[in-house]
Amino acid sequence: MFVASEDYEDNGLSLDKRLIARPAATFFLKAAGASPEADIHDADLLIVDRAEAPGPGRVVIAVVRGELLARRLPPGWREDDGLEVWGVVAWIVRAP
């Protein structure tokens, strides 16, 4: 439920302030194709934070044979498993 208030001050809407914790380490990528295990659809906008620590269950952008791919890290994943993680997907923006 949304309620309007007379004492509400409209400072504008900034998705940068809401979705990006570290601007210098954040990149936008557009998905070309789907990655069902990562719940990414074709043409989704991915907000990727390269400074975020990867971990099991997180969706990451990984370098596989020179190509950037979206993957969900499996349970038990460790940084020494050989997967080159480029960044962690912080947000997925999808058109309705």
Image (cartoon, rainbow, N blue to C red):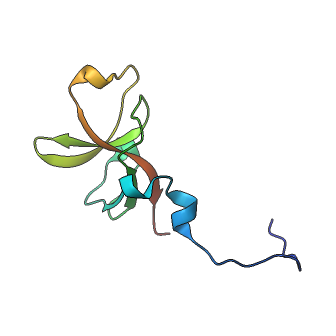
Q: Residue at x 43, y 58 (%)?
A: 23
Q: Residue at x 32, y 48 (%)?
A: 35
Q: Residue at x 44, y 32 (%)?
A: 57
User: In the displayed image of the protein, which residue is found farthest to the left?
Assistant: 65
Residue 38 x %, y %? 38, 44
Residue 36 x %, y %? 35, 46
Residue 52 x %, y %? 42, 41
Quarter of image, res 47: bottom left
Vertical arrangement, residue 54 with respect to residue 23, above or below:
above
**Residue 9 appears in the rendering:** yes
Q: Nearer the viewer, residue 65 or 26?
A: 26
**Residue 40 appears in the rendering:** no
Quarter of image, res 24: bottom left
Vertical arrangement, residue 77 with respect to residue 22, above or below:
above
Vertical arrangement, residue 31 with respect to residue 87, above or below:
below
Left or right: 43 with respect to 4? left
Q: Residue at x 30, y 25 (%)?
A: 79
User: In the displayed image of the protein, which residue is found farthest to the front?
Assistant: 24
Left or right: 39 with respect to 69? right
Residue 12 x %, y %? 64, 78
Quarter of image, res 66: top left
For the image shown, how many numbered marks are present on the structure? 0
**Quadrant location of the N terminus in the rendered image:** bottom right
Left or right: 17 with respect to 5? left
Q: Nearer the viewer, residue 11 or 15?
A: 11
Left or right: 38 with respect to 70? right
